[in-house]
Image (tube, rainbow, N blue to C red):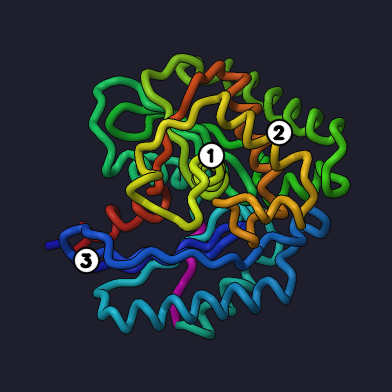
Amino acid sequence: MSRSVAVIDVGTNSTNLLIVDATGAIVLRHQATTRLGEQLHATGLLSADAIKRTVHTIAEHVATAHANKVDHIVVTGTAACRRATNTSEFVKAVSDATSLSVEILSEKDEASLAFAGALSGLPGLLAPTLVIDIGGGSTEYTVGVLEAEMSASVPFGAVTSTASHLSRDPAPPEDLTNLIGAVADELEEIGRDIPAIAAPARVIGVAGTIVTVAMVELGLPEFDNNALHGFELTRDAAEDVFRTLATEGFNERVLNPGLPRDRADIIVAGCCILVATMRRLKLDSIIVSTRSLMDGVAQRERMKP
């Protein structure tokens, strides 16, 4: 028998909440920027401040879940939690504040669950689909038909790549070139192991960077699921958004409709990852999905006894 579920997903950049009822219908979806991985590239650690504000946000999400009388709450952690050497401190802090454990997802499990979530609410297709998930700390590429079959992860995300590759804002052209080249090199390696990545029947893009680029392209003043879910983002459009945002400083960049202020400092690195992917894989366009990892976790948890 199915149950209502709240999923709290702790990423490198944001800590998000999804609540679905027993039928799988979405009750609430909320994103909060917490930057758990803000110092990770430099120190290999989750900072005390980042842990404190992330745990505070998790506690707020738990309170919201209780207010909605959900049957089950699950907390998942991804790239920042996998990489940090002091993740146990974060897990203990979450447990102390909420009495909940944190499920640290492996790269394979993250890719599989994001794949399942990305396809939800989109037309079925009995042919290979590639799902591209650009996160704060890493990017996952997953290929499958009805479920994930092959996946690979690269250590480039919007937060970590901003720290590791962009020396100032606006970033010098050579910084952008180096980041795009580094992602392309990783994809060349992946292509040898997963040839299907280069010839999918359909490509779906998920998570904050891709949704934000689509919002800027559409000029949306605020998130609009109906406009975004299933939107076809062409490579030309992605390149145009990249050129615009990369040549502006922060104060000018935030004036672009569709670009949230709390993402404006990391969006250029995210754009580099996106355009590098579309160039290297020769993708003319991708289909935007507003659903991803949390939706896949919710599907899994809803059907558990």
Q: Earlier in the sequence, mark 3 or mark 2?
A: 3
**Figure quadrant of the N terminus:** bottom left
Nearer mark to the viewer, of 1 and 3: 1
- Which mark, by number, is residue 21? 3
- Residue 170: which quarter of the image? top right
Residue 67 location in percent, x, y? Answer: 31, 84
Position above or below: 122 against 198: below
Q: Is 123 positioned to the left or the right of 243 in the image?
A: left
Q: Rounded to the nearest whole Å, what is the CA distance between mark 2 and mark 1?
A: 12 Å
Position above or below: 147 against 256: above
> Depth check: 150 or 253 in front?
253
The residue that label 2 is drawn on is 243
Q: Earlier in the sequence, mark 2 or mark 1?
A: 1
Residue plotted at (49% across, 42% down): 218
The residue that label 1 is drawn on is 217
Residue plotted at (24% across, 74% down): 71
Residue 186 location in percent, x, y? Answer: 67, 27
Residue 81 appears in view = no
**Label 3 with label 2: CB-CB less than 8 Å:** no
Residue 251 location in percent, x, y? Answer: 76, 57
Disc 3 element: loop
Callout 3 environment at 10 Å: few (<14), some (14 to 19), or many (20+)?
many
**Figure quadrant of the C terminus:** bottom left
Does 39 lie within the magenta span? no
Callout 2 environment at 10 Å: few (<14), some (14 to 19), or many (20+)?
some
**Label 2 with label 1: CB-CB less than 8 Å:** no
Q: Rounded to the nearest whole Å, what is the CA distance between mark 3 and mark 2?
A: 41 Å
Q: Is 186 positioned to the left or the right of 290 in the image?
A: right
Task: Give the magenta-colored segment's residue range.
Answer: 99-104
Q: Rounded to the nearest whole Å, what is the CA distance between mark 1 and mark 3?
A: 33 Å
